């Protein structure tokens, strides 16, 4: 691509030298030619065969126009023919034009016949690229006209992208069906459209100084795609790609931070109510087994541990320094910690960028960088890592170990995570506040969690990303083995971006985030509570092996609502084969309904629940079960909970490992039953048919993104 | 309309007599003419002025065609001109056509020039009407072409409808903006489109034997709308409108059923575990103060009350008979109860239509009708009416009185209502199972709840409606003063209806339900838990007086999520005027943010919450408050809960009555704080930013439907 780039580079350099922020139409067309982006073809033919060859080269239909210095009014002279759709029409058209011209003016000099590709037929689409503040160069695709302008039916991907990804974009718009041909319209040439998207992605990636590309409209016929209008905008000062550490560098620090042999608390205090006291108590009471060094120039002992006046005085190596001092003292203490060689600075203090003290934040970042110290925060509650009994926070200890690591950009959300965890006894590996994200961000944490055997799922609350591409790279690696749940806040606030092109105007922040996160394999949570419930459920739910979901319910009413929820969550209600239908029918009353949902009817004894559940677990064609329980005196809630837990455990032991979720409708005893079920690995919720299916849907979204589903 | 109807009636009668299920194109056009539905105009002119007059009458542009028995190939003869857009073009066109025809064949006899209205320009829309199994005649409107076929962008309303309602339909499609003119297109003639919708509604309402009307496409220009194709399908056996009781008749029975002076329990039993024992115990233990008559031929006393062998033996008048006997004995006992003159038969027994025993159900309906007895069920758990301490169910008593009446079509959902109510201490006026709805249905219950001073809100779970129009009529009356929340199950199951027209194919059950329920003013709950939370919150939340919502938050992170939730729920974040902004700023730290959300920052003392809350309550420009709390040691959860409850109560006493909802982020103590707030009339939820805003959004939806919002 270097030769291509050279020519394009010259055009861009010329515009830059002239201080222009937009290319001219001929410049745009020339760049398109270089990149193989089709624009309407044109040429002059001097014979009928010439005309046919030109037309065939650019694609039918074409327009023929007489070229003669003596004929000014071409139409009047019969010198224009439009819509010539095949070689024969071009051949005879060429002859008719010459004859008409001759008849019009026998003395006219004829230079030839201009052949122009006709555009405007076929599907109108828009293909573009913009420079997103978070993700850098992204390409956009949408249906043109009303669909994109009124319904904003557009999709985004990171640039550059593969041809397969470009093809995927064609299916990612709501009106995707249109391109396959509806109402008798010919389908669009998908390869041509995907090729054009891919080339636009290459163009904007090869040339960071291109800010936006707008091919609008592009007309796609059954045999090609042509960009009828090209607009290219320039950025006089393109952003530098962010610096990134290598995976090994990140892990070297993160492993020391999450599994420290020694932690120093800078500003440790014996006084109740001080942050430096809370951190000390949480480290000790949480059961952390490494060394704890309180740092306080005015104390010799804090909470029974020898105190040191400063980091230099600490006798041994220190992995982590937790800062619990006012902002104005941080720089000096950080310098000391850097000299001491800590791997991580846990920067609890506020009073930096979040209060406008941008300079102070820049200063401590610079100190940390200089010493190779990774800094978490500032302006955070700290972090938990339960496998090490590590509670380096000013909140209270949390010790229910489990598979999910959670991070939050906001302290309030962190507190909600803690409270929710405690009340639901959610099994947690880590809870981490990232606060101002002056240094350590989600990418670093993902890199650690990816290889952390104690973490099976990651859930992140975030408001922005410092390096969108770094995040996507990290997510793509992690989701191969672990779900990544993201609550992206600020999703309804449209970016107040100055839009220089159609594509730019369509690239509202959240749409770009949504498309790119989904494409990366993220399970996006629509709200805080959803994130928490996904985090609680996904790590303990087995991964489904296929798309066949079956509902077994004791309440017909729940069955209908559970079906609704399955459709809402993109789950596939299995079409039950006749033999399986018969097998279920054998267990249920004659007025029950097999099919799917399987309505075992109310008032059935435990054996009916057990028999149908066991059949659902053992039949290999079924991949996931949704249970609807109805509180009766024949099968009380705890009887149901115990039998389901037992049968699920028995069948897991038999190798029948499938996700099972349950909705319990009944009096308050169902709450205890749900807790029991959760404790036994069965996701169960009272008074809701939506929640259990939503978490199953989230697991499926991840399993699909990770490529784990058969068929 | 009778003369019109006569002519249309003759056309329909002819088709019926010929056994046709579809009208011919000329028949359809004739009916359109009668109803003033514009179809492409046509006529023959014998002078240029004639042609101009005809064209002006039908609207430009027009096509002119020579009419001559001697000219077969009109185009070849220069006898066709298209796209004549104004009088001058028609006038000259007329002359040119005649001249061309004369030149082509000087001897041809010329009858005149046909003037045809050209359609195909302007906006392509579809207008239709179908006979919905639930709602009867409904009209449909959508944008034609790709939008309606691929994106199903269509909306429905009951027929007949007013011109205003028809105009409203134009704005109810997602792509409504298109009709107002985008990308340089002229806007559509809204009055003409609405008029055509209104006329189609009149047509199908006037003639029940018309099953479907399909005007597709309709072309709407800036100056009119023309139906280019008309398709009318017939129903050989149109359904009779359902019989309805008058409001007075319904209330006469319902008042006796909900406020009975005496209740008989047919099948009362002293034996634990029997339904007839549970019902007796619940009536007694629930504290019902009327007379209770156990009916059991084998007992003389049950639970301390004298028993009677049958209804005839009961000494006094009986308002309600609760049936707790097997299905096969119901008919006889119902006959007795009818003779005794009960107002209501509470039909707990199952074994009727739900198990296939349709005949048995028909039999008991007939008996009840004959005696003027209203029957609830069969196949239900019974009903609660807390103002009378009435627990006529086999579940357990529920006694937390409050403003919401709940009904459920499914027993399982009824049990979920009970459990949820108990665990949240939801204030309830009634819980009613409607089961098979063989007689009493939602319409009857709405009619009672409308005038019941103990009920301030109605929440209904339903899977179908026996009489959709009766339901809409009842809802429209109720929502003027009380919110009606509906959980419509089965919403994702598309009706498996044989579609004879485009409109029919688009009329999936749920889209029709959704549009018509919303139009009636229903607050539709997306799921079971949403219905329960709306039911819990709406009756205790004051009605907002306007659209200005303000967020006050201690956690910036919650503020962003609460903003997202406001936008998701259709709430308007108030643009804070400068003076109010200054007033808020005076209470918050300099690095906090006024604007909206108002970020008071974490770590603030109770006074900051109190000052900003009080300002929000007292400033008359603010109509609703969303609070975001962040758990800190400076303002612990219960301190926040108590201060908010106190300030809200004080300002209510001052006449500042506004909805206040709160999201609490923190450790588990926030759960107790939320309970306290709920108990004091402030809607509050822990660990979620979505739920408090969702219930506020539900209240707003009702307030808008009831016309209670200013501006």
Image (cartoon, coloured by chain):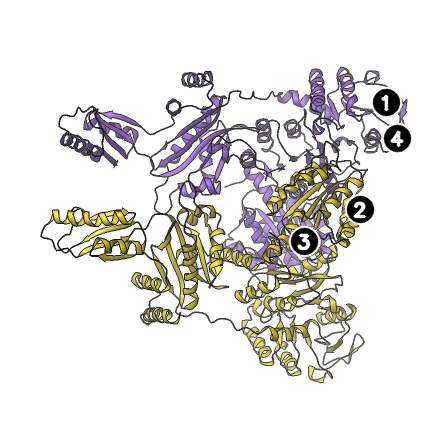
Chain colours: A yellow, B purple
User: In front of the other: label 2 or label 3?
Assistant: 2
Q: Chain of mark 4?
A: B
Residue B271 tag number: 4
Q: CB atoms at circles 2 and 3 under 8 Å apart?
A: no
Question: What's the CA distance linking mark 1 and mark 3?
Answer: 51 Å
Q: Chain of mark 3?
A: A
Q: CB atoms at circles 4 and 3 under 8 Å apart?
A: no
Q: Which of the 4 image quarters holds residue A127?
A: bottom left
In front of the other: A221 or B563:
A221
In front of the other: B679 or B99:
B99
Residue matched to label 1: B296
Question: What's the CA distance linking mark 1 and mark 2?
Answer: 38 Å
Q: Chain of mark 2?
A: A
Q: Secondary structure at mark 1?
A: loop
Q: CB atoms at circles 2 and 4 under 8 Å apart?
A: no
Residue matched to label 2: A643
Q: CB atoms at circles 1 and 3 under 8 Å apart?
A: no
Label located before the other in sequence (2 or 3): 3
Give residue A328's position: percent from left, percent from top. Answer: 61, 75
Question: What's the CA distance linking mark 2 and mark 3?
Answer: 24 Å
Q: Residue at x 55, y 68 (%)?
A: A356
Question: What's the CA distance linking mark 4 and mark 1?
Answer: 12 Å
Residue A660 seen anywhere in this rendered image of the structure = yes
Give neighbour class at mark 2: few <14, some 14-19, many 20+ (Cα, 10 Å). some
């Amino acid at each position: 691509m270097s030769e291509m780039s050279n020519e394009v580079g010259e055009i861009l350099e010329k515009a830059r030298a002239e201080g222009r922020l937009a290319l001219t139409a001929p410049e745009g067309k020339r760049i398109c030619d270089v990149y193989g982006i089709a624009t309407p073809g044109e040429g002059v033919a001097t014979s009928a065969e010439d005309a046919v060859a030109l037309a065939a080269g650019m694609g039918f239909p074409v327009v023929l126009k007489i070229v003669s210095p003596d004929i000014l009014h071409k139409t009047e002279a019969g010198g224009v023919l439009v819509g010539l759709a095949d070689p024969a029409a071009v051949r005879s058209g060429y002859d008719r034009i010459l004859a008409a011209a001759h008849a019009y003016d026998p003395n006219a000099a004829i230079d030839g016949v201009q052949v122009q590709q006709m555009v405007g037929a076929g599907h109108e689409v828009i293909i573009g690229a913009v420079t997103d503040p978070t993700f850098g160069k992204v390409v956009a695709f949408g249906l043109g006209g009303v669909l994109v302008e009124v319904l904003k039916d557009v999709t985004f991907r990171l640039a550059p992208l593969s041809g397969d990804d470009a093809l995927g974009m064609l299916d990612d718009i709501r009106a995707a069906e249109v391109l396959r041909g509806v109402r008798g319209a010919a389908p669009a040439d998908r390869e041509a459209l995907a090729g054009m998207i891919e080339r636009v992605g290459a163009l904007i990636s090869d040339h960071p100084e291109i800010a936006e590309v707008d091919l609008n409209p592009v007309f796609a016929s059954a045999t090609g795609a042509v960009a009828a209008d090209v607009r290219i905008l320039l950025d006089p000062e393109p952003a530098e790609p962010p610096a990134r550490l290598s995976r090994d560098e990140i892990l070297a620090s993160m492993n020391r931070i999450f599994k420290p042999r020694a932690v120093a608390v800078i500003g440790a205090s014996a006084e109740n109510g001080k942050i430096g006291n809370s951190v000390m108590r949480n480290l000790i009471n949480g059961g952390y087994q490494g060394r704890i060094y309180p740092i306080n120039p005015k104390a010799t002992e804090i909470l029974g541990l020898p105190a040191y006046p400063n980091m230099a005085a600490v006798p041994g190596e220190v992995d982590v320094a937790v800062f619990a001092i006012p902002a104005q003292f941080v720089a000096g203490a950080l310098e000391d910690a850097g000299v001491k060689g800590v791997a991580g600075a846990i920067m609890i203090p506020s009073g930096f960028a979040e209060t406008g003290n941008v300079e102070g934040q820049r200063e401590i970042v610079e100190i940390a960088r200089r010493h190779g110290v990774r800094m978490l925060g500032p302006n955070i509650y700290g972090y938990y890592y339960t496998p090490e009994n590590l509670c380096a926070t000013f909140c209270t200890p949390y010790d229910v170990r489990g598979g999910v690591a959670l991070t939050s950009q906001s302290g309030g959300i962190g507190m909600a995570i803690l409270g929710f965890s405690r009340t639901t006894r959610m099994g947690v590996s880590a809870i981490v506040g990232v606060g101002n994200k002056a240094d350590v961000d989600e990418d670093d944490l993902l890199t650690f969690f990816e290889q952390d055997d104690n973490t099976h799922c990651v859930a992140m609350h975030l408001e922005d990303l410092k390096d969108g591409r770094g995040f996507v790279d990290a997510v793509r690696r992690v989701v191969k083995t672990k779900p990544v749940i993201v609550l992206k806040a600020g999703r309804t606030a449209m970016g107040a971006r100055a839009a220089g092109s159609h594509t730019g105007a369509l690239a509202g922040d959240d749409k770009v985030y949504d498309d790119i996160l989904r494409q990366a394999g993220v399970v996006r949570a629509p709200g805080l509570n959803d994130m928490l419930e996904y985090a609680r459920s996904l790590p303990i739910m087995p991964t489904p092996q296929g798309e066949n979901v079956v509902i077994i319910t004791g309440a017909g009413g729940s069955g209908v609502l559970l079906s609704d929820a399955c459709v809402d969550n993109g789950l596939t209600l299995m079409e039950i084969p006749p033999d399986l239908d018969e097998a279920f029918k054998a267990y249920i009353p004659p007025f029950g309904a097999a099919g799917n949902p399987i309505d075992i009817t109310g008032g059935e004894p435990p054996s009916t629940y057990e028999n149908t559940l066991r059949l659902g677990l053992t039949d290999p064609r079924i991949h996931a079960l949704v249970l609807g329980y109805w509180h009766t005196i024949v099968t009380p809630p705890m009887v149901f909970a115990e039998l389901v837990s037992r049968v699920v455990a028995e069948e897991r032991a038999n190798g029948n490992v499938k996700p099972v979720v349950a909705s319990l409708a009944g009096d308050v005893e169902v709450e205890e039953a749900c807790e029991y079920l959760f404790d036994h690995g069965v996701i169960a919720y009272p008074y809701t048919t939506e929640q259990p299916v939503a978490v199953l849907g989230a697991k499926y979204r991840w399993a699909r993104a990770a490529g784990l589903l058969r068929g």
